[in-house]
Amino acid sequence: MIFLKTEDEIDLMRAANQLVAKTLTEVGKIVTPGVTTRQLDKVAEEFIRDHGGIPTFLGFPNPSGEPFPASICTSVNGQVVHGIPSDEPLKDGDIVSVDCGALLDGFNGDSCYTFRVGEVSEETNRLLKVTKEALYLGIEAARVGRRIGDIGYAVQQHVESNGYGVVREFVGHGIGRDMHEEPQVPNYGKRGDGKMIKNGLCIAIEPMIVSGSPQIWMLPDKWTIVTRDGGMAAHYEHTIAVHQGKTEILSSFEEIEKIENQY
Ligand code: MG
Ligand code: MG
């Protein structure tokens, strides 16, 4: 069942997602060669709690019932999603996808940004650019009267026409009082397929895109998802609300991009 949100609820969703955006900005400020993903996690957890939120990922169970041990997922290079923060320092040329969720006043925010560590290769830059473009094309397709499949179609077309692969096993999702609600929002699909997009719909759109084959493995830690061929993976995610006939992005990359452009 899809829970369509009222305007008051969307206000709360916006606040939760702005907290996530600010948290990712704080993380982005310290992403640099030599920093560990555990340090990024510490900054994120403190920032969320200092602003009255609860880090949703901390303790979130995997299908085996084991709790996620950190407040953010940090997926480096060929790691696609659900990477666990560690004491391994990031290196120049790495990329790290930081996925962050926070619960604030009963509603969830969820957003992910793939950060560059120092200078990355032209190839990696192109993967990041195409993945981010795919996210915004997906958002553009999410309009009242269209269907969920239109979103996946837009993402998939852009990604595959640029020679990249779409990971199938993980998808976007409805979001609200729960981090994962109906409907699922795949990053592939057919035009005109799936549920109708209506006012009040809040969803997270999150293309997980790889430079090579979209085949994945799960590491023995039962969390980290990696590309089988060792190719690079990028992941950008926004939470959006469709309301009053318009589509609003509730999360934001604005401040993150300002920091990035200082380099
Ligand atoms: Mg997320
Ligand atoms: Mg999500």
Image (spheres, rainbow, N blue to C red):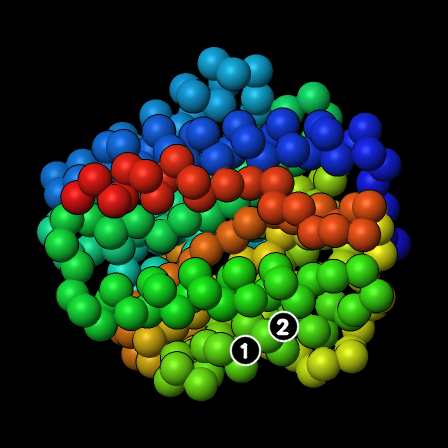
Q: Residue 186: in sight, yes or no?
A: no
Q: Amino acid at mark 1?
A: Gln
Residue 206, position in %: x, y? 54, 58
Position of 205 with respect to 237 (left or right) is right
Which of the pair 181/245 is nearer the observer? 245
Quadrant that contains the C terminus: top left
Does mark 1 have its CB less than 8 Å from ligand 2?
no
Outermost residue to the front: 245
Q: Is residue 230 above or below residue 128?
A: below
Q: Residue 211: in sight, yes or no?
A: yes
- Tag 2 secondary structure: helix
Are the two marked residues, 1 and 2, in contact with CB atoms closer than 8 angstroms? yes
Residue 144, position in %: x, y? 80, 60
Q: Which residue is mark 1?
A: 156
Disc number for residue 168: none
Which of the pair 8/207 is nearer the observer? 8
Q: Which residue is mark 2?
A: 152
Residue 213, position in %: x, y? 38, 82
Residue found at x 84% / y 65%:
145
- Tag 1 secondary structure: helix
Residue found at x 55% / y 66%:
137
Quadrant that contains the N terminus: bottom right
Residue 228, position in %: x, y? 35, 76
